Amino acid sequence: MSSKRILTDKIFEYLVTIIALTAVIAVILIFVFIVKEAFPIFFDNEIRYDGKGNEIATMSKMFLPQVIDGQLDFRWQPTSDIPKFGLLVLIVGSIKVTFISIIFAAPLAISAAIYSSQFAGRVFKEIIKPAIELLAGIPSVVLGFFALIVLANWVEKVLGVKPGLNTFTAGIALGIAVIPIIFTITEDSLSSVPKSYVEASLALGANKNQTIWRVLIPAVSPGIFAGVVLGFGRAIGETMIVLMASGNAGILSADFFDPAKTMPSTIAVEMGEIATGGTHYTVLFFIGFMLFTFTFILNYIGDFVVHRFKKKLAGLR
Amino acid sequence: MTQVVYKIKKKFNSFVLVTFLATLIILLILGVIFYDIISQGISHLSWEFLCDKPAEEIRMGGIFPAIFGTALLVLVMTVAVVPIGVITAIYLHEYAKNNKLTRLIRVAVNNLAGVPAIVFGLFGLGFFIQFIGHGIDNMFYGGEIVYGRPAIIWASLTLALLTLPVVIVTTEEALRNISKDIREASFALGATKFQTIMRIIIPNCLSGIITGAILAISRGAGEVAPILFTGAADLLPKLPTSLSDQFMDLKFHIFVLAQSPDVKNSTPVLYSTVLVLLLLIFILNLIAFILRSQLRRKFKSH
C-alpha cells in the first residue's frame, strides 16, 4: 500500500471521529446556553428585584404563596404592574395535564400492545402497526388544532363543561400523542419475552389465566414501566397541543376542568413578545432549564430500565 | 409463543376482548381525526389555494408563501443534518470501538432525541441568534443587525439538531443490513477503509440514507415549537430571498390561524392548511416506508 493511501485513510478516520462528536457537542451546548441565560436568576439582583428594590423573581417569590388581594395565593402574571412569577402555577398545570394524558393513554396503549403482540392475527397486526406509526406521524400542531376545533366542542356539549378549552381537553389531546410512544415500547418488550417463560408456567400446571397475570405481565412490567416513564417525559415537554387546547390561565387550581398553563406553553407564548435579557426572559429560560433537567432524568430512567430488561431477557433466551 | 398463547386466547375471552377493544378505540381515534380533517379540508382545497398569496390578513387567499417557506426551511435543514447524521452513523457502525467515546456519543444521541422541542427553540434563540448571529454582525457588519435576529438559517439549523437522531438511527439500521461479505471482499481486493466506505458502503446503503433524510424532513415539517422564536413570521407575502430573511411556514401558519380572534371565519382556510400539511407528511412517510421495506427485502434475498 502506498503511503499516500494510508494517509488519506487516517485523515478520513480523524474527520469522521470529529464530526461524530457533533451530537455530544450539541447536548453540551444546549445545556451550557440554557444555563447561561437562566442562572442570573440565582445571583443577579437586577434580575431578581425591580427598580424600586422590591423582590420579584427570588426563589421565595417564585415558589412560595404570596399575599394577593389579602389572600395567600399563587399567580403567574408576568405583565402586571408588579410582575408575579408564581412558578408553582405552571408546574402544577404541567403535572395536571400530563397526569390526564397518561391516565388516558397508558391503559389504551398497553392493552393494545398486549393484543397486538399476543393475540392479533397476522392481518390485523399488519393494520395496527402502520396505524400507530400514522398516529405518531401526526404533527403536534395538528393535534392541537383538532383539540381546539373539535374536542373542545365535544367537551362543552357532551360533558357540559365550560369553557371547553381546559386541562381535561388538553390532557386527552396530549394522550393521543403519547399513545404511540407507550405502545411501541410495551410492544417491543412484550415480543422479547422468551417462549420458555410461558411454556414453563404451563408445564408446572398453572392454568392460562394464572400464566397471563403471574408470568407474562410481571415479566414485561419493566417494559411497561419504561414506556409510561418515557411517555411522561414526552408529555411534559410537549408544547403546541397544550398551548392550543388548555385555555392558558395563570391561576393555581386543583380542578381538572379549569383552564391551565403549563411550563412549555408559557415559554412558547411569552418568549416571542419580550425583550432579551430582562427578568421575564431569565425566568422563561429558568423554566426551560427545569424542563430540560426533568426530561433528562425521565429519559435516563426509561432508557436504563429498557436496557437492563433487554439484557436480562437476552441471557435467558 | 403464538401457538401457546393462542390456546390461552380461546379460554380467556374477557381479557382478549378488553385488549381488543382498546386497540379498536385507538384505531377509531385515528379514523375520527383523519375523517374530520379530510372531509372538512377538501372543500377549500384548490390550485389557487396552493399557489396564491394570503389575502385579508391571512383569513382568505392561498398559502403559497407558507409552502415555499416550509420547502426552503427543510431544504436547508436537510443540507445541514444529512452529512453530519450519516457520518456519525458511519463512525458508530464502521469505526467505533467499544470504548467510552462510543458510549458517550450513543448517550448524547439518545438524549438529543429526548430534549423537548421548546427547549430547542430556546437554544436556537440563545445560541444561534444571540451568540452566533450577533457575533457575525459584530465581526462582518460592524454591529448592524443582519444575522442577529430570527431568520430562516437559524430555524433550519435548530431543526437540524432536533432531527439529527432520526438520521443517525435510520442510517445505522441501513449499515447494519449490509452483509459482512461485501466489506471483506473489498478489503481482500486491497481497498482501504476509506475506499470501501466511499465506493462500497455508501452506495449500498443509499436508499437507507434517503429514508433517513425523508423521515427527518417529515419530522421537521411538523415541529412548530423550535421555530417560534428562531425565524417564522405571521404574515409575510414576500418570499424569502436570503438566508437571513424571516419566512412563512405551513405548520406555523396553522398555529397563527388557530390563534386568531375570529377563528370561525378562518376555519375553512385552517382546515385546508391542516390537510395540506398532513398530506405532505403522509406522503413523505409513505415513501420512507416503501424504501425501507424494499431495502429489507433486498438484503433478505442476499
Image (tube, coloured by chain):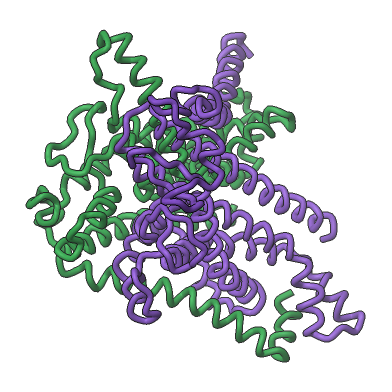
**Residue B171: in sight, yes or no?**
no
Q: Tag count in the figure? A: 0
- The residue shown at (44%, 22%) is A46
Seen from the viewer's position, the closer of residues A31 and B43 is A31
Looking at the image, residue A2 lies above or below residue B189: above
Give me the chain that's purple: A
The residue lying furthest to the front in this view is: A70
Chain B drawing hue: green
Q: Is residue A281 left or right of residue A44?
A: left
Looking at the image, residue B105 lies above or below residue B113: above
Q: Is residue A152 left or right of residue A222?
A: left
Seen from the viewer's position, the closer of residues B300 and B3 is B3
Looking at the image, residue A159 lies above or below residue B218: below
- The residue shown at (32%, 61%) is A145
**Residue A171: in sight, yes or no?**
yes
Seen from the viewer's position, the closer of residues B293 and A222 is A222
Q: Quadrant of the N terminus of chain A?
A: top right
Residue B30, percent from left and from top: 41, 71
Q: Quadrant of the C terminus of chain A?
A: bottom right
- The residue shown at (27%, 11%) is B143
Seen from the viewer's position, the closer of residues B73 and A14 is B73
Please identify the quarter of the rendering in which residue A110 is found: bottom right
- The residue shown at (57%, 57%) is A231
Residue A82, percent from left and from top: 37, 38
Residue A208, percent from left and from top: 79, 84
Please identify the quarter of the rendering in which residue B149 is found: top left
Residue B178, percent from left and from top: 59, 44
